[in-house]
Amino acid sequence: MSQDLKSGSRWQSVVCSGEVVIVKAPSAPVVLTIGGVEAVLAGSQEASGAPAEGHEGGTQVGKRYEHGDSGLEVLCTKAGAGSIAVDGQILDVKGAQALPSSD
Amino acid sequence: MNITMLLEMAAGAMGDRIAVGTKADGITYQELYERAQRAAQVISDAGVERAGLVGLNGDDLPLMLFACSLAGVGFAPMNYRLKDEQLRGIVGRTAPSLVVADKDVLGRIENIEGVDLRERHAFAEQVTDSAMIEAGYTDPESVAIWLFTSGTTGDPKAALLRHRHLVSYVLSTVEFMAADESEANLVSVPPYHIAGMATILSNTYAGRRTVYLPQFDPEVWVAMASEEHITHAMVVPTMLGRILDAMEATNTTLPHLRHLSYGGGRMPLPVIERAMTMLPDTGFVNAYGLTETSSTVSVLGPEDHREAFASDDPAIRARLASVGRPFPSLELEIRDPEGAVLGAGEVGEIYVRGEQIAGEYHGKSALNAEGWFPTNDGGYLDADGFLFVEGRLDDVIVRGGENISPGEIEDVILSHEAVEAVAVIGIPDDEWGEQVAAAIVVKLGASLSQTEICDYVRERLRSTKTPVVVQFREELPFNDTGKLLRRVLRSEVAEYRASLNN
């Protein structure tokens, strides 16, 4: 079953507590994994087990992660022990710009 | 990706922090989230498409906004100060809707078709007794907020902000949990102002406690800021001068105030200079934005303020009157009336484009084919990319073919020691099309004549920019969000001129 990574859809890991929301959809179909295993729609499964080797970097809530090639951007809404990857490539945290609070 | 997600994240990562209210009896993010789910069930049960609020600021405002999002309906905060007919008109436009109103407003908006009216306290009790909603998927494309523009001309327009605009705004401008636990934000802008909505989203995401003033009063503001150890606040320009007066009158210092942002109108230079002198440890932020742009698009930050204030270089010093640099997450251009992009220093219309830019009214998008929003504000960028806003294009005075910006003349008049407040406007003139006129409030105990002030302006600007009519007044007409009612003023000053000729 392929993932429909549409903007606004929410995904969870099946091996850790990590959850993300899609901020920018990918330009072409890709496979999103959290902890090395394909992510599923949030709320659809109990997570169990542990992240796969090489996918144990973990995520931080409130950080955005992006995949340059496909343009996919996700926001971590719940932290977990597994890293986020697209087609096997671990995603980097998108650099945040420090802006003064205006409201 | 909808605004509920912002609250859900805050409740998950910092659920025990106080979200809204005083240190003593505020409610936490977890409590706010749970209560919003109950309120969403009440709204959902009503089977409506929108929910409105007609009343003062209150601790239930974030609750209403997030509950509407959870229920999948748009939230419409409305201005109770409108005249009955206009208020009933906009309330009716939200139908089918559930509208929560303060007790003293209820009688004015009864029996409107399609409007399920609830008294505010009664609604709160219904929320307490309700079950929590089972939230489904909220489409990022759906409308989160309806804001009726102040409508100084014709009927108010309903500006629509979709979830994706608001979430983009927050994600690109606020770092999650950026606030430390001691931070508290004092909100005195009314709920039906874009700043009143944006502040809920930004501060929830940052994890900063919010304290509400039911309505702005300078003495109460200063007392509350002092008691509640307020660290952050946003004010409109007309509030700042009054806050400084109240600080002096009550001999209050605000040592906890780290950060004061202002926007929503032109800030007179003498006022911001006085504020920086009286609050030397506070960081000031000048924010420029519109309802249609999901709040701020450009900021002059604390460092920019200090650098400009301390500089002897006129070009750097002048930045104190700018709104800083546009956000890196969006594009901003200055264009001429034909749409050609202008260079540094050239005045034209400000255009913006980006993910937070909604540029939409009910039934009609105002974006052009390339997605740019024409703001109807005039301005220019300096050589270093600082944006200077000159005000609404409609306010530009056209005198015999020459475009004259009121702001420049206002700044000069305001620098005169006898002047408390001023507005410069164009009044109809048979010979020139329009002529420059000024309405001036003189400081208590000072005196000023028309000849004196006109000589003063002529020495500093061209004679074409010197007012031909000066009306001395007790006060200027502002609406409650600090916007000068230029149309009202124009007709009053034109009448005054006619009375002189008779």
Image: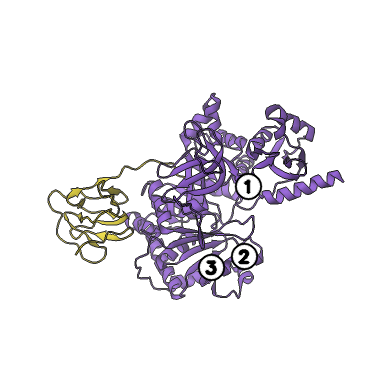
Chain colours: A yellow, B purple
Q: State whether discs 2 and 1 lie on one chain.
A: yes
- Image vertical order of residue B156 relative to residue B289, above or below: below
Relative horizontal placement of residue B353, taking residue A62 as reference (left or right) = right
Residue B37 position within the rendered picture, expressed as x and y whole percent measured from the top left = 39, 67
Chain identifier of the residue bearing label 1 in the image? B
| Nearest to N terminus: mark 1 or mark 3 | 3
CB under 8 Å between callouts 2 and 3?
Answer: no
Relative horizontal placement of residue B242, taking residue B8 as reference (left or right) = right
Residue A60 position within the rendered picture, expressed as x and y whole percent measured from the top left = 27, 49
The amino acid type, in three-letter code, at marker 3 is Thr
Residue B333 position within the rendered picture, expressed as x and y whole percent measured from the top left = 48, 41
How packed is label 2: few (under 14 Cα within 10 Å), some, or many (20 or more)? Answer: some
- Toward the right, the furthest residue is B502
- Image vertical order of residue B134 relative to residue B391, above or below: below
How packed is label 3: few (under 14 Cα within 10 Å), some, or many (20 or more)? Answer: many
Residue beneath disc 1: B394
- Give the Cα separation between the discs numbered 2 and 3: 11 Å
| Nearest to N terminus: mark 2 or mark 3 | 2
Residue beneath disc 3: B94
Relative horizontal placement of residue B117, taking residue B425 as reference (left or right) = left
The local secondary structure at tag 1 comes to helix
Circle on res. B87? 2
Residue B388 in view of the camera: no
